[in-house]
Amino acid sequence: MYIVIVGAGDIGSPLLEIATAGGNEVVVIERNEERAERASRQYDCLVINDDATSKDTLEDAGADRADALISTTDQDATNIMVCLLAQELEVPDIVSVVHNPEHMNVFRQIGVNTMQNPQRLIAEYLYRAVKRPSIVDFMRIGDEAEVFEITVTPGAPIAGKTLQEANEEGLIGGQTLIVAIERNGDGDPITPRGDTRIEADDLLTVYSGEGATPEVTDIFGHSEDHS
């Protein structure tokens, strides 16, 4: 892929590392001279030390033939301007970081894919690691629903039961759905059926319409989430 990345700061630099390591043709636009020089030394990509809110700069970066443009600056106004110019240049895929949640709707209105402020996401993960230690990983869907990973403890109410049995006993069903099962840490995930039996130490991917509440995590044997 031909990717234009705007910004080589705290977010743009790791992105540059991943994109170049993936064998993509990458051009980065960075207004700060020091950051631009550092990026040119560290990564196998073309670095343009200029203002990305100028259409000429984006054209110099080849945005008119790029497969994607990702704007990562720390200013939402700059990211919006870059995205609007990228649309004029008909870049197929445009993605931007959004720092202020109040600006999310603006990005949606102009048809740009967004990524919430990564620092806030990291903070939420850290808080969740303390508040709900049983949750391995999670993704919020809407206001309440979540998809999360959780390990089944030996004494869990669901351990040793098939999904059908668990449903009949009211342990799952309704707003809770087990999506996948990883067992013994190897092989492909198991796609659960009604007769699939849940075993202790299984790593489950779970969808919960009410989120990973203590009442939900209790089913998998994690009463510590009430603390």
Image: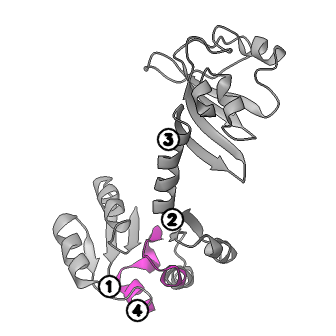
Residue 36, given in percent of the width and then of the height, sits at: 24, 78
> For the residue labelled by badge 3, is the local secondary structure a helix, a strand or a loop?
helix
- Image point (61%, 70%), residue name: 101
Residue corresponding to mark 2: 117
Give the foreground label among 4 and 3: 3
Q: Tell me, for residue 130, which label it has, or none.
A: 3
Amino acid type of disc 4?
A: Asp
Structural distance between the alpha carbons of marks 4 and 3: 48 Å
Structural distance between the alpha carbons of marks 2 and 3: 21 Å
Give the foreground label among 1 and 3: 3
Quarter of the image that includes the C terminus: top right
Amino acid type of disc 2?
A: Asn
Structural distance between the alpha carbons of marks 4 and 2: 28 Å
Amino acid type of disc 1?
A: Arg
Residue corresponding to mark 1: 31
Give the foreground label among 1 and 2: 2
Give the foreground label among 1 and 4: 1
